Image (cartoon, rainbow, N blue to C red):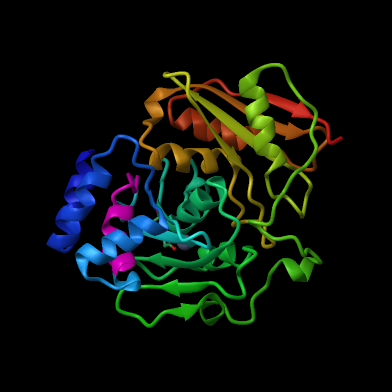
Amino acid sequence: MNENLLHALNDCPPRLAQSLLPYLSDEQFSASFSAEDVTALQQVSGLSAAELAIALLPIAASYAVAPLSHFNVGAIAHGESGRWYLGANMEFAAAPLQQTVHAEQSAITHAWLSGESRLTAVTVNYTPCGHCRQFMNELNCAEQLMIALPGCATQSLHYYLPNAFGPQDLGVTQMLFDPQTQRLSEHDDPLVQAAINAASQSYAPYTGAYSGIALQLASGYWITGRYAENAAFNPSLPPLQSALILMQLHGHPVSALRRAVLVEVAQASLSQREATAATLSALGCHQLETVTVTVK
Ligand code: THU
Ligand code: ZN
């Protein structure tokens, strides 16, 4: 178990800390808890589901990478399947601040990449900023999504974002977490194909600029990420950030990065290439391969 997790355990109620130990010390721990885990943790800790989610926030926040602010934010995305996905903010020293990932985006993307088809709630240790409220308004569950915070009554997303601007203002009805399967051309190289598969599941209803990334690690294992566009454009999450979220939550250090392949569609109206290369460079990875594919 890493040191940050160990520290975070000290911030949990003792009975919960004790029952979390087997999960957190498992090398395969995926920074998420199944519905059965949640029930078991509730039984041993004596906490309600809502209390348990709040009590787990220090664990989520322990995944934060915040070299600029030293402000650790932790979030939990509650999947319709009953699984809880942890997330934390990620800052990149030497890259523009716009590349930052917020904890809510991390937890939500974690759930999306794990195949969850809908969320019910997001629990977070600080009030969500405007950018996150807008990011969450892109979700297919936005109308029903609840936001839980320590010391506050749980409220709907629309309580926090009244009079919202969203996909409907641009005539978009398919929303983030709705199944996306773009038919893209194929490739012989398995890493490139992994990035193509990610791109085919990306969400880009405003530009059609579907994109995905595959990051190969020293072990040979790879992690993929998909682009998540936003009606207000700026809160869009680039594919690199999506993959980096999963790397961080699954315990892979960026120093393990060996190869990066970005896939974009030919003649797209925008490109992730320059920003991706710059952020990767800030992380010490100076080679980005870009492959363009056609939509079939
Ligand atoms: N942060 C979040 O993760 N979520 C929010 O909604 C508030 C802000 C992060 C972003 C940045 O890494 C740090 O907190 C300071 O703003
Ligand atoms: Zn935010």
Q: Where does the C terminus fall, quadrant-wise?
A: top right
Magenta segment includes 218? no
Q: Nearer the viewer, residue 9 or 33?
A: 33
Q: Is residue 120 left or right of residue 6?
A: right
Residue 63 horizontal/vertical position (percent): 33, 47
Residue at screen point 63% across, 20% down? 190
Q: Is residue 154 left or right of residue 140?
A: left
Residue at screen point 31% across, 54% down? 61
Magenta segment includes 59? yes
Residue 73 horizontal/vertical position (percent): 35, 58
Residue at screen point 38% across, 83% down? 153
Residue 58 horizontal/vertical position (percent): 26, 58
Q: Where does the N terminus fall, quadrant-wise?
A: top left
Quadrant containing ligand 1 reads bottom left
Q: Is residue 208 left or right of residue 24?
A: right
Does 10 appear above or below 155?
above
Q: Which residues are magenta?
A: 52-67
